[in-house]
């Protein structure tokens, strides 16, 4: 915790999407080290955005007038609408300069876990735009994840009575806002040139059962169990003086599993909700055991910006390792319940958003401890 307004700044930054506690602190200290003129300019832009920017009354895209520039463009094809989740997705499609229709921004995706249903999105406005019969094709370009697929499926069923051609990007949006121009029918049809455009990802041709993902799920499950067994044994007293090197090995192995998940195509399980796996595991015993075994080196400092005049933020290895364990256990509960696709989805999602960060920080800290220890030994045995 920091004093007064500094902590308030970190708290406010932490409320931004995609910004965790570490990221909020990194941004806050970057701002504190910036030129005051730059900060005043940033503050002025934020105020100007709140006063001038609005959402287009037709499509929902960001605009500075009642209608955005795309809806005002008479050259646009009025018969085709591309449905996206957020205004940033409009910019991603526009970059390729191939789509000449108009857009409809939903303002999010269906997510029962977050309490977001169809009524919370701009679905009613979409149906109004389709009611006059001028639109003949609807491209459902929601994100290729659990929520995006659920939203696309819902919309396809909603507009089915209208007799529209409903298509979906073959690969959809990926990280960085790339776009795949070919489209496929929501029923798994073929493209206009006759080529099958169904995804070649595992699980795409098995009726949603996820059979194609079983080998990867089995491999990751084994790596997760090995990590939990190894870390649990070390927390209970095994390992002796080799505690830190053995932890370094365990963390490296599980991050290798994470890298495999990160390099795989997006795992998209069927349905639009995550089955309940029960209560979260109580890892206080594991955390406490690791803290005792790591006494003297459990706490470490992470410097977010080495070029800024800021102090390292303090973290604990025991907390990082327990966080990794919690996410791995959650996925194992899915796997052991016979849901390998949900297990992989969770491991992949949580690796990118949570345990990969904690594991990476722990790896750096453990490597630093080992490196310092080896350097100290080398100095002691150097001949005089």
Image: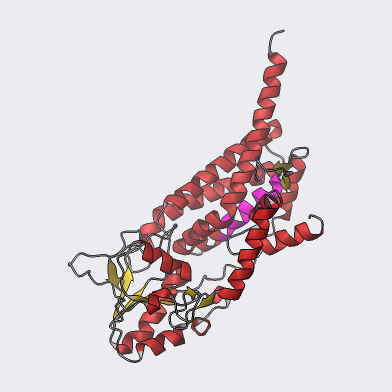
Q: Is residue 371 above or below residue 31?
A: above
Residue located at (76% from left, 57% from top): 6
Residue located at (32% from left, 75% from top): 101
**Residue 163 on the magenta segment:** no
**Residue 318 on the magenta segment:** yes
Q: Is residue 180 above or below residue 85?
A: above
Q: What is the residue that sits farthest to the right in this orientation? A: 3
Q: Is residue 189 above or below residue 306?
A: below
Residue 24 in view = no
Query: Main structural element of the magenta stretch: helix, strand or loop?
Result: helix
Q: Nearer the viewer, residue 317 or 126?
A: 126
Q: Nearer the viewer, residue 163 or 48?
A: 48
Q: What are the residue bounds of the magenta stretch?
A: 316-330
Residue located at (35% from left, 85% from top): 159
Q: What is the residue that sits farthest to the bottom in this orientation? A: 132
> Residue 58, how many percent across, how many down?
43, 83
Q: Nearer the viewer, residue 208 or 198?
A: 198
Quadrant in the rendering for residue 68: bottom left
Q: Is residue 211 above or below residue 63?
A: above
Q: What is the residue that sits farthest to the left in this orientation? A: 193
Horizontal side of 220 relative to 280 (left or right) equals left
Horizontal side of 382 relative to 161 (left or right) equals right
> Residue 43, how many percent across, how many down?
66, 63
Q: Quadrant of the C terminus?
A: top right
Q: Quadrant of the N terminus?
A: bottom right
């Amino acid at each position: 915790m920091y004093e007064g307004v500094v902590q308030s700044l970190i708290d406010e930054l932490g409320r931004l999407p995609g910004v965790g506690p570490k990221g909020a602190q990194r941004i806050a200290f970057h701002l504190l080290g910036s030129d005051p003129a730059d900060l005043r300019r940033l503050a002025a832009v934020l105020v100007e955005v709140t006063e001038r920017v609005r959402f287009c009354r037709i499509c929902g895209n960001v605009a500075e007038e009642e209608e955005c520039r795309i809806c005002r463009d008479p050259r646009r094809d009025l018969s085709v609408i591309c449905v996206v989740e957020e205004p940033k997705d409009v910019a991603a499609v526009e970059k390729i300069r191939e789509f000449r229709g108009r857009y409809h921004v939903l303002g999010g995706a269906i997510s029962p876990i977050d309490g977001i249903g169809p009524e919370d999105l701009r679905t009613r406005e979409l149906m109004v735009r389709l009611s006059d019969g001028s639109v003949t094709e609807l491209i459902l370009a929601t994100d290729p994840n659990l929520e995006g697929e659920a939203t696309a499926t819902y919309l396809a069923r909603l507009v089915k009575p209208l007799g529209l051609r409903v298509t979906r990007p073959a690969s959809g949006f990926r990280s960085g806002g790339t776009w795949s121009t070919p489209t496929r029918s929501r029923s798994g049809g073929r493209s206009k040139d006759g080529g099958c455009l169904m995804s070649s990802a595992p699980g795409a041709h098995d009726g949603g059962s996820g059979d194609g993902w079983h080998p990867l799920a089995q491999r990751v499950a084994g790596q997760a169990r090995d990590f939990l067994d190894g870390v649990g044994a070390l927390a209970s007293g095994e390992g002796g003086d080799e505690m830190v090197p053995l932890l370094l090995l365990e963390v490296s192995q599980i991050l290798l599993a994470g890298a495999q998940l990160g390099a795989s195509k997006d795992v998209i399980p069927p349905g639009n909700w995550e089955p309940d796996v029960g209560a979260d595991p109580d890892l206080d015993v594991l955390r406490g055991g690791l803290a005792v075994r790591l006494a003297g080196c459990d706490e470490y400092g992470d410097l977010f910006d080495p070029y800024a005049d800021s102090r390292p933020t303090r973290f604990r290895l025991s907390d990082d390792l327990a966080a990794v364990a919690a996410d791995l256990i959650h996925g194992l509960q899915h796997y052991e319940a016979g849901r390998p696709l949900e297990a992989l989805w969770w491991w992949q999602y949580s690796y990118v958003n949570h345990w990969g960060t904690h594991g990476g920080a722990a790896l750096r800290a453990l490597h630093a401890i080992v490196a310092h220890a080896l350097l100290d030994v080398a100095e002691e045995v150097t001949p005089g």
